[in-house]
Image (spheres, grey):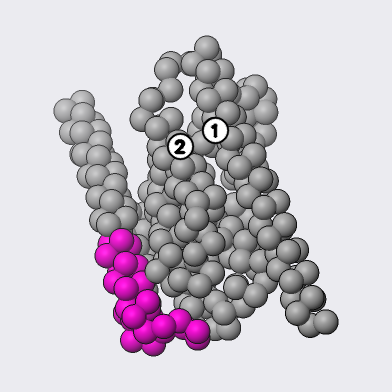
Amino acid sequence: MNHSNHNHSDNLDMILIDVMQVVFSFLFLLALFAYFFAVKTSNRRHKQWPVSRTIFWILGICCIGAAILSPIQMMSHSNFVAHMVIHFLIGMLAPLFIVCSAPMTLFLRTIHVKQARRLTRLLKGRLNKLILNPIVTLLLNIGGLWLLYTSPLFSMMSQYHFLHWFIHVHLFIAGYLFTLSIIYIEPIPHKYSFAFRSIVLLIALAGHGILSKYLYAYPPHGVMKDQAEIGGYFMFYAGDMVDVILIYMLCHQWFRASRSRATSTIKVDNV
């Protein structure tokens, strides 16, 4: 009887996984089509949308698709290294690509002027100011990772599929909001100084690096030591790769802003 119930539960899990994969496949195709349609609409009204931003969008969607729809998704339930690969794709690489594709800017260029003004007023609201505060995004991103790997949440992921998907969605949203709050590519109504964002980024780098070393020394419950060591290595060095890109982009924006202010000052002095 128990064996029959167990088989029935396994069948339901497989059906749920198949349904979720179909849903996500549809959403990915919809996201690609919507972006292409928005680019075509924007190009008719404004100057040409940069091809590089479209490429970034495709890369971001492909990262999420590779993490969720490929065999690595099934492997992640029992393989910690596979889980870390998904964590990297969804929580770090995909958010960086999506932010660089500037979907909100494209959307504002696509919709009617009155609707764009309404949306801009909404973006200037207090809630958006709170959500995009670098301290808040730091807690959601790095704080969420510490909570996941140092609590029973990680072991519960393999038992409850809805929790598994929820955590994946959280990883992406937290990574996206953090990246958005550090490098200003999209229109950000409530901007913070470069110095403040640099400090927050350094704290995030330290928190992520310390966590990877902690996982190397103290594997989560149910994770074999050799997998924890490889996963910790991957988390540390793959994370460093994205972190270097973030540092470069932030410093580049800082340099350009400083040069622009210096040029404006020189012009005023000459007058």
Residue at 39% over, 87% down: 218
The answer to whether 240 is drawn above or below residue 115 in the figure is below
Q: Left or right? Give the position of 151 relative to 54.
A: right
Residue at 40% over, 37% down: 56
Q: Which residues are magenta?
A: 211-240
Residue 32 is tagged as: 1
The answer to whether 28 is drawn above or below residue 42 in the figure is below
- Percent position (x, y) of residue 85? 41, 61
Residue at 40% over, 69% down: 81
Q: SS class of the residue under badge 2?
A: helix
The answer to whether 177 is drawn above or below residue 262 in the figure is below
Residue 57 is tagged as: 2
26, 152: nearer the viewer: 26
- Mark 2 crowd level (few <14, some 14–19, many ≥20, 10 Å Cα): many
The question of residue 232 being in magenta is answered with yes
Residue 58 is tagged as: none
- Percent position (x, y) of residue 177? 50, 54
Most extreme residue toward the top is: 44
Residue at 58% over, 58% down: 169
Q: In the rendered structure, are the residues bearing label 1 and label 2 in contact, judged by CB atoms less than 8 Å apart?
A: yes
The question of residue 78 being in magenta is answered with no
- Percent position (x, y) of residue 77? 54, 69
Query: Is the N terminus in the top left, top right, bottom left or bottom right quadrant?
Result: bottom right
Residue type marked 2: Trp
Query: Is the C terminus in the top left, top right, bottom left or bottom right quadrant?
Result: top left
**Can residue 84 be seen by looking at this rendering?**
yes
196, 47: nearer the viewer: 47
